[in-house]
Image (cartoon, helix red, strand yellow):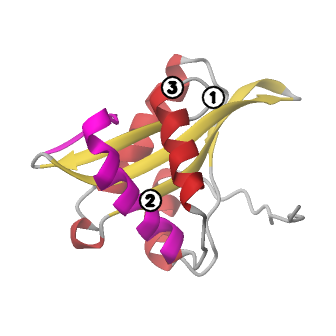
Amino acid sequence: MISVDRLEASDRDAWEALFRAYIDFYERVEPPEMYERSWREFRADTRMHALGARLDGRLVGITHFFVHANTSGPDVCYLQDLFTAPDVRGRGVARALIEAVTEWARERDCARVYWNTHESNATARRLYDKVAENRGFIRYQIEL
């Protein structure tokens, strides 16, 4: 059975392994201090938030998210990162994490939960197309 809850201090190593796998999946390289800063923020649970999914007691999935202001209505929740261990994909872990973030945001009166994924991420998009609406937006960014 899948359970989803806040990350505990004892989850630090398993969380980092999953987060590093997520960063690797998107072919990025991040400095070690990024992991430290993120972990501190998630433990504070004020600006940035994290949940972990467990299957048979093992941390097998993570999600990171935060709330931000919205110019045209109530605050919204951005689900920034979502990753599940490859050996448990297809067992409902990602869906459970999305549902948990959605409930968390609903309890805080957010207007919506939204996220981005790469167009080539076909595996994740099969789930996303079932649980959310693709509004067709294209993302642009400027690196600083």
Position of 119 relative to 9 (above/below): below
The amino acid pointed to by label 1 is Arg
- Where residue 47 is drawn, which disc sits there? 1
Q: Do the residues labelled 1 and 3 touch (CB within 8 Å)?
A: yes
Residue 112 position, x and y percent, is: 64, 34
Q: Name the residue rendered at 51%, 36% in the picture.
A: 40
Q: Nearer the viewer, residue 34 or 15?
A: 34
Q: Name the residue rendered at 30%, 65% in the picture.
A: 85
Residue 139 position, x and y percent, is: 80, 64
Q: Which of 25 and 16 is in front in this view?
A: 16
Q: Distance between the residues labelled 1 and 2?
A: 18 Å
Q: Which of 66 and 14 is in front in this view?
A: 14
Residue 118 inside the magenta-drawn segment: no
Q: Distance between the residues labelled 1 and 3?
A: 8 Å
What's drawn in magenta, residue-wise?
1-24
- Read off the residue under disc 3: 44
The amino acid pointed to by label 3 is Ala
- SS class of the residue under badge 2? helix
Query: Left or right: 8 with respect to 28?
Result: left
* Residue depth check, mark 1 versus mark 3: number of the one nearer the observer: 3
Position of 13 relative to 23 (above/below): above
Residue 4 inside the magenta-drawn segment: yes
- Where residue 19 is drawn, which disc sits there? 2
